[in-house]
Image (cartoon, rainbow, N blue to C red):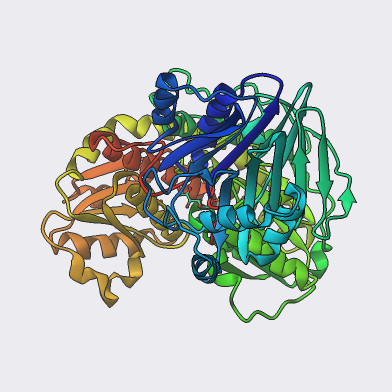
Amino acid sequence: MCGIVGIASNKSVSANIVNSLKKLEYRGYDSAGLATLSNNLINEKKCSGRVEQLEKILFKAPAEGNLGIGHVRWATHGIPNEINAHPHSSEIVSVVHNGIIENSNNLKNQLEKKGLKFKSQTDTEVITLLLTEELKNKSPLDAVHETLKKLEGSFALGIIFKNFKDMIIGARRGSPLAVGYSTNENYLGSDSYALKSMTNKISYLDDGDICVLTKDNVEFYDFRKKKINKKVLLLSDDKNIAHKGDYKNFMSKEIFEQPIAIKNCINEYIDKSRDEINFYNFPIKPDSIDKIILVGCGTAYHSCLVAKYWFEEFTSLTVEADVASEFRYRNLKFNKNSLYLFVSQSGETADTAAALDLCKKNGVKTCSIVNVVESSIARNSDWVLPIHAGPEIGVASTKAFTGQMLLLYMLSLKIGNLRGDIERKYYQTKIINLKKLPDLLQNSLKTEDKIQLVAKDFLKSKGSMFLGRGFSFPIALEGALKLKELSYLHAEGYPAGEMKHGPLALIEDGLPVIVISPNDKYFQKTISNMQEVIARGGKILLITDSNDSVISENIRFKINLPHIEKSLSPFLTTIPLQLLAYHVALLKKCDIDKPRNLAKSVTVE
Ligand code: F6R
C-alpha cells in the first residue's frame, strides 16, 4: 500500500504535497513525510501518525522548495515510527516507495559489507543506498536504471536528487504509479485520485517504466531505457469527491448513500422501458461459457460468495469463488471457455491484480467489476463493468459491496437469460423487482435507531457470532468482517448449519449471536439452529423480514426488514450489519474511517 506524491513546479510545493497526501491516506496512515529541495539541500520532514501531524511540523518549520516528494505509509518492514517513515534520504538522494523489496536482506548485507550504514529497519533504505553508490559515477537516469535491475519484488518509486533541482524520477514494477500534467508544473502520484485536485490530465506507467519529470517536461522510458510515448488520459470530474457533508464521517455517508448508488447503477445498466439489462461485448459468447470463476479479497470476495448462489440459481453453470491470495498460487487448470471475474472496489488490490495477470498469461478472458475505472485492474481486463458507486473513502467497504453485489446479480441474470437457462418472463419479473431495490434499501436504513440500542450489548462482550444459511451465509461473513475491522471485537461468521460441528462450544451465557434469516427456503432450518444457540445462553439479534410470531420468544432483539423477493435479500440484510459495526465502533470511540492497522487500497501481497 502506501501513497506517493511528487511535484516539480515553479512555486513552493510543500502545501500541495500535504494536500495530496491527505487524499492518499486511504492507502496508509501510520506515518507520513516529505522531502523538498532548497538551497541545494534535501529538506526532509517526517513523523509517525497522520498527515495532520506532518502539517503541524511543517507549520513550525516549513519545507521550502519548488520540487518535492511525499509519502503516507502502511508499515511492512519496521514499526511505524519517525525513522521508518518515508522519504529515506542520504546526503544526495531521497526516495519514497510503495511495495516490498523481497531481496532487501541480501542487498542490505552486501551494502553493509561495503561499510554503508542503515538508519531504519525498512526495505526502502536499500534503494536509497544503492542509488547513492550508483550516483558516484552515473547520471540520475542511469543510476535508477542500474538500481532497479538489482531489486526483486514490487515497487512504485519517487526519487529526487540533491544536485538536480528540477528533476523527479518515478519508476514502477507491480505497484501503480501515474504522472499528471499542468502548466509550469508536473506531478507523480500513486493514483489519479491523489492528482485530481491539481490536474485532469494523466498518464499511467506500465510495469518496468521509468519517468523523468521536470516542471516543464515529462519523459518516459521502458525497462531497456528506450524512450517511449504515453497516452494522456482525461479524468472524469467527480464533483462530490471526498466531502462528508453533514455526516460525522465518510462511512456513515457511504452507508446512507447506498440507495442512490444502487439507483445510479440500475440506471446505468437497465433499460427501464424494455425491462432489459444492457451488457454488451461479452468477451466469451454466453452460450459458450462453461464455468464462472469469481475472485476477490475481503469484502469483495464476500460479494463473489453471494454471487455464486445467484449464478447457480439463474444459470446452469458451475461456479467457483476464490480469495485472490489463494487463487494466484493454486495449481489451476485454465480453460478458454471459462469466464474469470475479478471483483475489486479500488481496482488496485495486489492479490487480485496478480490473479488477473495469471489469467492473462494463461490466455483466458477476464472481466473486472470495479468502482475505480481508471484503476490497474480495470485497465488490464478484457471487459470492465464499473459499479458507479462514486468514491468510497471510508476504509471499510459499504456502498461498494452492495454495488458489487448488484453488478453480479445483473450479470448472473443476463447470462442466464442469454443462455436460455431462465425464461424471459422470470427474467423480466426479476428486473421489475430489482427496480424497487433503492426504495427498500432506504427503508432498511430506518433500522438505525434500533441498531443503536443493540450496539450497547456488544460493549461488554468478548466476541460475537454471525450465522446464516444460503445467501445469508456470506452476509454473515461480511457482518463479522465489518464488526472486526471497525470495533476490534472478535467476530466469527458461520453457516448456521455448521454450528453443531464445533462452534456451538463457543456459545455461553450472554454471547451476542446475530442470526440472519430472511423468509426464504432456509428460514425454518436457521430458526432451529437459532433455538440451539438460545438453549445454550446465546443472546440473539435476529435480522429478518418474517412476521412469524413463534420466533419472537427468547430473542433479545429483532430487526424487521421490509419484504423483498428472496434472491434480493442479501442487499437488505447487509444494511443493519453495516450499521451495527458502525455504532459499536462509535460507542467504542474507534477511528471509523481509518481503523487501526488497515488501509483502503491493499497494494502489497
Ligand atoms: C473490508 C474491506 C476490504 C476490501 C479488500 C479488497 O471492509 O474493505 O476487505 O474489500 O481489501 O479491496 P478491493 O475491493 O479494493 O479490492
Choose between 78 and 553: the one closer to the eye.
Answer: 78
Q: Is residue 202 above or below residue 224?
A: above
Q: Left or right of 184: which side holds 86?
A: left
Place residue 496 in its image quadrant. bottom left
Q: Residue 161: where, in percent of width, then height?
A: 65, 41
Q: Is residue 551 above or below residue 104?
A: above
Res 272 seen here: no
Tell me how many marks there are: 0
What residue occupies the far left of the structure in this picture?
Answer: 509
Q: Residue 140: where, in percent of width, then height?
A: 73, 47
Determine the residue positioned at 60% across, 41% down: 433
Choose between 355 and 579: the one closer to the eye.
Answer: 355
Determine the residue positioned at 49% across, 52% down: 299
Determine the residue positioned at 78% across, 53% down: 383
Q: Left or right of 491: which side holds 400?
A: right
Choose between 58 and 28: the one closer to the eye.
Answer: 58
Q: Left or right of 341: which side holds 58?
A: left
Q: Residue 18: where, in percent of width, then height?
A: 53, 28
Q: Residue 92: where, in percent of width, then height?
A: 60, 44
Q: Left or right of 383: which side holds 76?
A: left
Q: Is residue 500 above or below residue 162?
A: below
Res 225 seen here: yes
